[in-house]
Image (cartoon, rainbow, N blue to C red):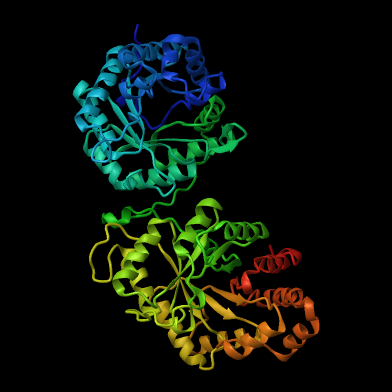
Amino acid sequence: MRSSKLPFLERLNKNEPLLGDGAMGTMLHQQGGTINACFDELNCTHPEQVMRVHSAYIQAGADLIETNTFGANRYKLSKHGLENRVAEINRAGVELARKATETSGRDVYVAGSVGPLGVRLKPFGRVKPEEARAAYTEQIRALVDAGVDVILLETFSDRMEILEALSAARDVSAEIPVIAHMTFGQDDRTLLGDLPAQVARDLYKAGANVVGVNCGGGPAQLSRILQAMHQAVPEATISAMPNAGFPQSVGERMMYPATVEYFADTALTFKAIGASIIGGCCGTTPDHIAAMRRALDNPALPLPHIQVVETNGDDHDDVPERPTELARKLAAGRFVVTVEMHPPRSFVPQKLLASARLLQDAGADMVNIADSPTARMRMSPWAVCHFIQTRQNMETVLHFPTRGRNLLRVQGDLLAAHALGLRNLFVVMGDPTKIGDYPEAMDNYDVAPSALIGIIKKKMNSGTDQAGNSIGQRTTFTVGCALNMFADDIDREIATLQKKIENGADFALGQAVFEPHLIERFLRRYEEIAGEPLKMPVLMGLMPLYSLRHATYLHNEIPGISIPDAIMRRIEDAGEDAPDEGVRIAQELLRDIRGMVQGAYIIPAFGRYELAAEVIDGLAVTGAR
C-alpha cells in the first residue's frame, strides 16, 4: 500500500526543508564496487547492496532518497552492453527504494535519479536534441510508471541538455514534480559558460518545480551559487546538494575533506538562504546526513546570517562577485608579500614553476609575472601566470604594459587574460623597445596606464568595451598601478596617483625603497594635497642587493632609486658575502616599512628567487606572520 504522506509539492510548502540523502556511488564503492563498474546494474544483480545504502540514509534521517538510476539511460548503459535493459534497471531501482521506505515506518519520498547521457549534444557533439529527448523519455517513463514521487535531474553541466531532459519529463507526465539541478565549475559557470542566474531563469521558465545545484565544489561554492539563483528567480523553490568539499587524491582513493560537523552548519546555511530541499552529493555519507538532521531538528541553533546582494535585473549582475585572494587580503588589512618573477627565455617553464613553489613554501602570498622586462624577448606572461595558477595553485599578478599595443589588442588581450582565470593586473607603461633585444620593434601605444585603468574598472568591469559595446558579461579584474614615492617631483607623482585612483585603481606597487623615512615624507605631502590620508593599499618594492656592482648600477642608472652611502659600504665590505648582506638589508627594510604600507613587493635580481625566499623568512623570525 502507498503511504498516506502528503503529496510531494504540498510537503515542500511547509516551513521546514526536506532532507535528502547523500552519495550513492561513494557508498557502493566502499562496499567493494569498482569505479568502472555499472552501479545501476546492481539493482538487479546485487539488490542487497543498494538496499543497505537506502536503509542507512533513511536511518540517518533522510526525508528523500534517490533511486540508484543516475546512469541508467541507454547511452551510458550501452558501454556495458545493457542498453536494452533500461526499463528493467530503472524499475528495479524504484522497487528497491520503495521497499526501503515502506520498511522504515517513516514518510520518506522517492526521487527518480536521472543524470546526463554521457554524450555531447549538437552543436557541440554528435547527438541530436531529439535523440537525447527520446533517451530521457525512455528512462523517465520507466521511473514514473514504477511509482516515484518526483523526478530528480541532477549533475547536468550542459544547460541545453537538462532542458531536453525536463521537456522529456513533461512529455511523460504533466503532473510529476521535477527537481532540476545543474553543476558548476570552480569559476561558478557551467561547462559551456552559463551563469547561475541564467540557468535558474531558464529552468523555472521551462517548468521545473524546484531549481537548484548539486555536486561541483563544496558547500561554500554551492551556497554562493544558490544565492545567485534565488536572487534571479525569488519565486522559485530552490534546492542544494553539495559534495563533501573538493575531492583529493590520497593513494588510490578519492577523499572528500568536509567533516560531518561542517555539514551540520551547511544545512543551516542552506536553510537560511531559503532552500526547501537540502542533501549531499559525492563524498557524503549517512554520517553527514545524520549531522544535518540533528542541526535541522534543533530549534535552539540560530540560522547563520546570509548577506543578500541586491541586483537591478541587469544581466551583468549575474556575474558572481569573486574577489581575488589579493583583493580579499588587502580588504582585510593583511600585510601582503608578492615576488616579481621573469618569464623564461624559452618554452620550458619547469624551473620557473619550481621557483614559484619555493616562494609559496616560504610564505609568499602570490607572484608578479613581468611582461618582457627590459624589453627582452620572453615567454608570454599570460602563459606563465596560467601555469602557476593551475599547476601550483598560487595566485598571480599579471603585468600588463600598454606600450606596443593598440587599443584593439589591449582589450582583446584583457579578455584572453580573464578567460584564463587571471584577475589581478598591474597596469604599467612598459619598457621602451630601444633598450632591449629588438630596438627597431614597434613602440607605439594608444592608451596611457591611467586611462587603461579607467577602461578596465569603469568599462570592462561593467560589461562593455571602451567604445561602449557589450562584451556579454562584466569582467572582475583587480587592478594595480605603479607608484614612485621617491620621485624628484613629488607633487606631480601625487597628481598622477590621484588620477589613477579616480579611474579605479585598487592598489599600487611602489618603487624599491632603501630610505624608509622618505615614505613618511610622501604620505605627509599626499595628505596635505588631498586633504586626507592615502587610503589605497601600497605594496612597497624591496630589492635585495646582490653585489656592489649591482648596487652601483641601481643607484646611478635607475630613476627613483637612491641607495644611501651606509648601505653601499655594507655591500662593499661584505665582499663575496654581498648576496647574504643584501638579504639582511632587505629584511631590515621589510621590518621598517611595516605600519607605513600594506605589503612588500620583492624584486630579486638575476632570477635569484632563493634570496627572495630568505627575505620572506625574516617575517617569520620577527613573528610578523
| Residue 122 quadrant | top left
Residue 498: x and y, percent? Answer: 43, 82
Q: Is residue 235 above or below residue 150?
A: below
Q: Is residue 33 above or below residue 337?
A: above
| Residue 116 quadrant | top left
Please identify the quadrant where the C terminus is shown: bottom right
Q: What count of labels does the image hold?
A: 0
Residue 35: x and y, percent? Answer: 50, 25
Q: Is residue 24 left or right of residue 183?
A: right
Residue 614: x and y, percent? Answer: 71, 66
- Name the residue nearer the viewer: 265 or 577: 577
Please identify the quadrant where the N terminus is shown: top left
Residue furthest top in the image: 1
Give the residue drawn at x 47%, y 57%: 386
| Residue 409 quadrant | bottom left
Residue 276: x and y, percent? Answer: 38, 33
- Name the residue nearer the viewer: 480 or 95: 480
Give the residue drawn at x 22%, y 24%: 134
Residue furthest bottom in the image: 489
Q: Is residue 615 above or below residue 387?
A: below
Give the residue drawn at x 50%, y 60%: 347
| Residue 604 seen in render | no
| Residue 193 seen in render | yes
Q: Is residue 59 left or right of residue 144?
A: right
